[in-house]
Every structure is written in structure tokens, then in C-alpha cells.
């Protein structure tokens, strides 16, 4: 059986770690194209200035327009060439990170997440949008980022909702990797560069990836609440460090090399409902996870453990929690259809799935979540 595992060359996480960014730039050369939203640059300006001076490197600011679109990627590539940048830095949230991946195309790339809201920083893929912000396509690169550098002090000072949303994204990782392993489905780590040309073949997940995904889940259950409270106080504690590692590293390697399945597909389906647009990726994935557990008839103890965790940290457990107060039969059918299109990861579940199964799972997950929440509130 062909198996594959992919990860960044280096992952480093610590307090005030951005002070070492210049060191990593210097391993590539004298200057880096900095792709970051101006607000994020402002947040860490003192540290950037300090590390640039200390290591004698230059950050070429790009005036990133905030959208990971083809024209913006092209504009940034031209700046990198004109300024002879030795590497690319993606600093900030998902869009800046994905744009930097598209500009670097698997070459020298340093990713500096300033929030821990998703598991995108470590991956070798990006989501491309139109200049107006609509989904366009996925892109895959030959390598993961060279360095993922995480400054825990910066993440502790970001709004807690980002960290909690990251926990929602990380919550699905184990259950999706488990389903993918049970069905012997392919994982993203097996996708070659230029996968559309089919340069290489597909691959299954490794035991290593499933072990990381399992550790990711256990870490959330053990340290999730403590980390949320630390983030509320903008304090770095061992629990917060563990959750940052779970959200970014464990979940990142776990999803890419362990596989996606029901939770993310149901998330994708839910995005057609306007009400969900105010909610973050990880918040919707948390509800998608609950729906996957219903779909696969997971034991009630497991469902209760997930519900307890979600309520503890403040993740959604029912449709109303993600902006869907009521759903018509037609809307539900459309969500389920979208979750089940041929390219969706839902087909990595270890049994055949039809849209009607997904509709039922969503409604039962909603009811279980709602009832459980009400019961807890009455105690
Ligand atoms: Zn995700």
C-alpha cells in the first residue's frame, strides 16, 4: 500500500518568537517579501523592527490587499522578483498565509500565524478566491512551508474567539482521520505538485498521522478550557501552549496526512446558508463533527464527551449556534446535496453515503446538541 506524510521542514513555537524571524530569513538571504495585512504588521511592528536590525535583514512590505486572488498573487510575485527577495513571509491569518504559499510555490517560505484559528499554516495547499471574495479553486505546492514560526505571546493577545474556533477545526481532525483510516481512503499528503497532471499516484495515511490526530483530540479534552481562560486573560500558560500546538501543528499534520471526511464536507454544505457566514470556519466544523458522529453512529459516551468539550469552551452544538435559527426542508436538502458532491471528503467515510443520510444526521445532531445544552443550563 502506498502511504504518504507531509510536514513543514521546521516548526518553532515560543514566547516573543517573532524576535527570531530575522534569523530564519537570513538562512535564505538578505531580504524577505512580507505578505501581511497592515493591521497585523502594526500589531508586531516593534518585534519586526528589532529582529530586522539584530539580524541585518530587510522586510519588503507588499501592501497586501487582503484577498488571496490570482491578480493579487501575480502583483506580489512581481514585487518579489523586482526587489530580489530571498524568501516570502506570510504573516497573519488564513488569507495572508495562503497568499504567501501561492507566491512562494513550494520554495523558501516562512509562515507566521498571528492567530490560531485554523490548521492552515503547516499545509502545502491554499484556497484561491476571486478578487470579489468568492471561492475559486484549491492550489497545491510541491512542499510545505520551510518554517512555521509561532509567537505564543501574540496569539495570547488575539481575541479568544479565534483560539476557540481553532479548537473547533482541531476537534474534527481525529474523527476524520479515524474514518479515513477505516475506509483506506486517500489523503492530501499524497497529492503531487501539479496534481491535475497526475504526475504521481494517490496515497493512504500513515500510522504517524493517525497518532498525531489522536493526540490532538486528547490535548483538546485535557487543556481546552484552561487554554481558553488563559487567552481571556492574554496570558501564556502551559495549557495555552499545548492548545496552540494542537490547533496549528497536530491538527495541521493530522488533517493533511490523516485525511478529511464527514465533518469538513458537512461544513462545506452548511456554507450555502447565509446565516452561517457570520461564523468562523472552525465553529461550523465543530457542528459538522457532531453531525459526522451521528452519521457514523458513534457511542453516546463519545458524543457526550464532544458535547461537554464544546459547551465548556463555547463552540456551537446546534444549528442555532451557527446562525441557522430554522431550516426549511429545501435548505436542508441543498446542504446535504452539497456535502455529498463527488469531490467531497464525505466519501472517505467507511460506508456509502447519500444526501438523505446527511440530512438526517444534521437534524439529529441539532436535536442532541440543543437538548444537551438545555439540560446543562438547567443544572
Ligand atoms: Zn478545517
Image (cartoon, rainbow, N blue to C red):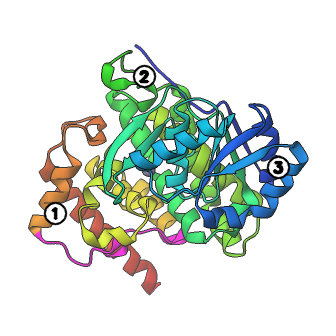
**Stretch of the chain drawn in magenta:** 311-328
Badge nearest the viewer, 1 or 2? 2
User: Within 8 Å: ligand 1 and the Cβ of disc 1?
Assistant: no
Is residue 222 among what the camera can see? yes
**Mark 2 lies on residue:** 192
Residue at (36% x, 20% y) in the render: 202
Mark 3 closeness class: few <14, some 14–19, many ≥20 residues within 10 Å:
many
How far, Cα to Cα, is label 2 from label 3?
A: 35 Å
- In this rendered view, identify the residue nearer to me: 132 or 134: 132
Q: Position of residue 172 (x, y in %)?
A: 44, 50
Residue 230 shown left or right of residue 160 in the figure: right
Lower position in the chain sequence, tag 1 or tag 3: 3
Mark 1 closeness class: few <14, some 14–19, many ≥20 residues within 10 Å:
many
Residue 225 position (above or below residue 354): below
**Mark 1 lies on residue:** 332
The circle on residue 52 is 3
Residue 322 position (above or below residue 358): below
Mark 2 closeness class: few <14, some 14–19, many ≥20 residues within 10 Å:
some
Q: Are marks 2 and 3 in contact (CB under 8 Å)?
A: no
- In this rendered view, identify the residue nearer to me: 323 or 183: 323
Q: Position of residue 272 (x, y in %)?
A: 24, 61
How far, Cα to Cα, is label 1 from label 3?
A: 52 Å
How far, Cα to Cα, is label 1 from label 2?
A: 35 Å
Residue at (67% x, 37% y) in the render: 85
Task: Give the residue at the far front of this rendering.
Answer: 82
Q: Secondary structure at mark 2?
A: loop
Residue 330 position (above or below residue 4): below
Magenta run includes residue 319 = yes
Amino acid at each position: 500500500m502506498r502511504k504518504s506524510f507531509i510536514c513543514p521542514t521546521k516548526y518553532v513555537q515560543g514566547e516573543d518568537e517573532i524576535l527570531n524571524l530575522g534569523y530564519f530569513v537570513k538562512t535564505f538571504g538578505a531580504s524577505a517579501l512580507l505578505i501581511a495585512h497592515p493591521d497585523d504588521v502594526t500589531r508586531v511592528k516593534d518585534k519586526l523592527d528589532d529582529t530586522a536590525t539584530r539580524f541585518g535583514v530587510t522586510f519588503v512590505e507588499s501592501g497586501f490587499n487582503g484577498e488571496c486572488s490570482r491578480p493579487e498573487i501575480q502583483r506580489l510575485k512581481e514585487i518579489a522578483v523586482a526587489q530580489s527577495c530571498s524568501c516570502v513571509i506570510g504573516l497573519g491569518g488564513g488569507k495572508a498565509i495562503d497568499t504567501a504559499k501561492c507566491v512562494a510555490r513550494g520554495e523558501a517560505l516562512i509562515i507566521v500565524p498571528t492567530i490560531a484559528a485554523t490548521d492552515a499554516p503547516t499545509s502545502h495547499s491554499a484556497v484561491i478566491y476571486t478578487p470579489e471574495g468568492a471561492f475559486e479553486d484549491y492550489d497545491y505546492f510541491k512542499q510545505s512551508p520551510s518554517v512555521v514560526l509561532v509567537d505564543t505571546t501574540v496569539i495570547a493577545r488575539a481575541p479568544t474567539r479565534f483560539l476557540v474556533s481553532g479548537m473547533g477545526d482541531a476537534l474534527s481532525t481525529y474523527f476524520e482521520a479515524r474514518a479515513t483510516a477505516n475506509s483506506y481512503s486517500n489523503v492530501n499528503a499524497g497529492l503531487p505538485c501539479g496534481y491535475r497532471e497526475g504526475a504521481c499516484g494517490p496515497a493512504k495515511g500513515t500510522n504517524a498521522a493517525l497518532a498525531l490526530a489522536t493526540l490532538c483530540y486528547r490535548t483538546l479534552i485535557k487543556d481546552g478550557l484552561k487554554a481558553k481562560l488563559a487567552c481571556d486573560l492574554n496570558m501564556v500558560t502551559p495549557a495555552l501552549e499545548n492548545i496552540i500546538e494542537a490547533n496549528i501543528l497536530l491538527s495541521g499534520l493530522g488533517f493533511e496526512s490523516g485525511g478529511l471526511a464527514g465533518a469538513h464536507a458537512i461544513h462545506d454544505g452548511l456554507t450555502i446558508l447565509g446565516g452561517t457566514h457570520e461564523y468562523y470556519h472552525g465553529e461550523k466544523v465543530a457542528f459538522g463533527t457532531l453531525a459526522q458522529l451521528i452519521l457514523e453512529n458513534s457511542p453516546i459516551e463519545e458524543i457526550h464527551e464532544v458535547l461537554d468539550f464544546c459547551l465548556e469552551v463555547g463552540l456551537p452544538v446546534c444549528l442555532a449556534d451557527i446562525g441557522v435559527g430554522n431550516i426549511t426542508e429545501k435548505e436542508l436538502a441543498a446542504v446535504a446535496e452539497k456535502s455529498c458532491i463527488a469531490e467531497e471528503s464525505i466519501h472517505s467515510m467507511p460506508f456509502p453515503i447519500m444526501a438523505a443520510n446527511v440530512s438526517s444526521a444534521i437534524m439529529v445532531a441539532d436535536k442532541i446538541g440543543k437538548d444537551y445544552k438545555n439540560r446543562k443550563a438547567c443544572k
